[in-house]
Image (tube, grey):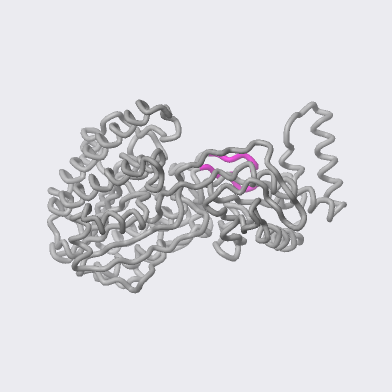
Amino acid sequence: MAGDQRVLLVGWDAVDGEAVSHLLDEGRLPNLAAILAGGARTTLEGYPGLGDDAHWSSFATGTPPGIHGRFHFEQAAPGDYQQTMIRRDRPGPVDTWWSRLGRLGATATVIDVPKSPFVPTPGVDEVVDWMAHGADADDPTASSDPLAALVQRHRPHGAFAECHRIDDDESGVRRHLDQVAERRDAFGDGVRAWLADHPADVTVVVFASAHCVGHRAPFDGPDGDRVAAEMEALDDQLGRLVAAWGGDPRRVGVLSLLGMFTAPDAGPEAEATVRALNRRWLVRHPRIGWKAVAKIVKARLRRQQGPVPTADAFTTVKLIAPATVVRVNLVGRQRRGIVPADKLDEVCDWLVARLSEMTDATGRRALTAVYRTDAALPGPRHDALGDVVAVWGLRRPGRVRTSVTDVVPDDPRPSTAGDHRTGGWLISGGGLELPGATVMVDELGALTAGWLGFDQASAAASFDPTALTE
């Protein structure tokens, strides 16, 4: 493909759209502003309550989470109750849109797209887990020996440390931020060195550094200037990357799928509320309730202490801080389910109704969205997440009330956590036409195919229901 027809996509992981607008208005992102001056900006729409795993996997595969089945970095296997880490070590039911274009004859360079399947394809130079935040593996995986060698030459400190595992004191945070900056600069140097000698029809590069800074100092928090400084550094990297890439600067897109702001940890409220609703529902269904009692009695006779998850009609599932997911303990789906399959609609509709009416101590609605996954995230893997999703407002609810519960959590957590929310955006140069004011994150692959001159349907996913999910 001619140099003036190539496309460059640059991802700034977890950079919120409000932060971008603020710094653009202040003139602090000149390279991004130059792209926007001749182009356009659109909002990227995603999935309420879901975080980066779900969104980046949807970006990479061109499918919604109910199809690709990756919702969180920890998930329970079908039928299980214990959540385990998600890895790339098995093929998924769908591959990536750049692999599909590669099989049509396009060439691609794809560097560090988070949470995406790794599918070796002729014509596609790809590396995963180089400098990604929340990498699936400690060591990078590359599609060729030369690319693997380049990655190892530009990789200070090895794998990224998890942000929540660093020391909370100022010296620990400063050390973390210094290492993030060193990694970002080494990453940029390595990417530019590769692109200078390996032109491709489409190039996708994702910088993780703003994600790593944002977890410790969200833009709307007291240390938000640290995120602003990181965004300025990313803007400098953008200008240097476009120059090394060598294509038409009007055919560059810069994007973030999600933002990063402060959000309350509503875990105690969620857990206490769902436990209370679980007890109420079992009382309403005494035949199922007695099965639950029998399981608890057997566990105690075996001297098993603590909760007995197989005795619950439904339980919470770990997700990002502002959201709570409820999974029904369904007969035939969970190994020791107690809720008959013909009761699934009844229990889900009852949960949606009870959660939708929840208020906090001030009388305001505690949730901004409540939905069933089978309706909002259709596909054969929607229940890998759970059955009902509840998205909390950006405040601590404290006391929670519904028509059947009035809960004060036993373990209040006054602190807030930096976490994802809506805030996705795409800024593209004048040579890349946008379809409208909003674009779904799972449509970006098809949109890129169109920019390259392919029919957009050529990047559509082919779903294999017999394949294992990641």
The residue located at (31%, 34%) in the rendering is 177
For residue 68, side relative to residue 269 (left or right) = left
* Residue at image point 59% right, 45% down: 266
Q: Residue 466: x and y, percent?
A: 53, 56
Of 26 and 124, the residue lying toward us = 26
Position of the N terminus by quadrant: bottom left
- Location of residue 70 in the rendering, given as x and y in whole percent from the top left corner: 49, 51
- Magenta segment includes 26: no
Q: Quadrant of residue 10?
A: bottom left
The answer to whether residue 123 shows anywhere in this view is no
Front residue (pair 389, 154): 389
* First to last magenta residue range: 74-84
> Looking at the rendering, which quadrant does residue 43 occupy?
bottom left
Q: Where residue 403 sits in the image (x, y, percent)?
A: 75, 58
Question: Magenta stretch containing residue 77, yes or no?
Answer: yes
* Camera-side residue of 217 and 110: 217
Residue that sits furthest to the front in the current view: 362
Position of residue 232 relative to residue 153, above or below, is below
Q: Hey, which quadrant is residue 418 in on the image?
A: top left
Residue 148, image x, y percentages: 25, 38
